Image (tube, rainbow, N blue to C red):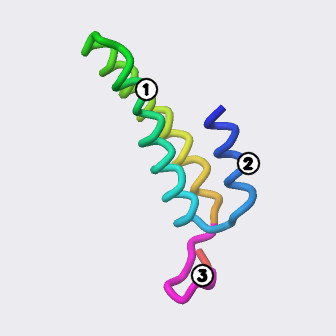
Amino acid sequence: MGAALGVLMAQLPRARRRFLVVTVVATGLSLIPPIGLPEDSVTKSVLVAAHLLAATIIITILSRGLTPVAANGGTRDR
């Protein structure tokens, strides 16, 4: 579900920085249940690693197609 939301969000704003900030915050929030719910530390580690791996792959692929934003707020060429 998070990946589908990321794909939709990547299509709306064509600003890489905004997309990266939102997805990194969402990834951080998605780590709360895997850290808080399982009592076994190995399970926690595997769930956190899986979340981070999936987020890294998805965010990297989606952000490649977005336009960087210049310091003055406009877009700049790649």
Task: State which tag comes first along the sequence, 3 or 1.
Answer: 1
Q: Which residue is found at the position 51% from the left and 39% from the top?
A: 57
Q: Nearer the viewer, mark 2 or mark 3?
A: 2
- Above or below residue 30? Residue 8 is below
Q: Which residue is mark 3?
A: 76
Q: Percent from the top left, x then y, of residue 17?
A: 52, 66
Q: Percent from the top left, x then y, of residue 46?
A: 35, 19
The one nearer the camera, 12 or 62, is: 12
Q: Which residue is found at the position 38% from the left and 18% from the top?
A: 37
Q: Find the distance from the CA under tag 1 to the CA under tag 2.
A: 24 Å
User: What's the amino acid at mark 1?
Assistant: Pro
In the image, farthest residue toward the top:
40
Give the magenta range: 67-76
Q: Helix or strand or loop: what does disc 3 sit on?
A: loop
Q: Helix or strand or loop: what does disc 2 sit on?
A: helix
In the image, farthest residue toward the bottom:
72
Q: Percent from the top left, x then y, of residue 4?
A: 69, 38
Q: Find the distance from the CA under tag 2 to the CA under tag 3.
A: 23 Å
User: What's the amino acid at mark 2?
Assistant: Leu
Say which mark, if any, is on residue 33. Answer: 1
User: What's the amino acid at mark 3?
Assistant: Arg
Left or right relative to 21: residue 74 = right
Q: Which residue is found at the position 58% from the left and 84% from the top?
A: 73
Q: Find the distance from the CA under tag 3 to the CA under tag 1.
A: 38 Å
In the image, farthest residue toward the left:
41
Say which mark, if any, is on residue 66. Answer: none
Left or right relative to 56: residue 73 = right
Q: Which residue is mark 2?
A: 8
Residue 1, quarter of picture: top right
Q: Nearer the viewer, mark 3 or mark 1?
A: 1
- Name the main secondary structure of what is drawn in magenta: loop
- Are there few (<14), some (14-19), or many (20+) residues within 10 Å of tag 3? few
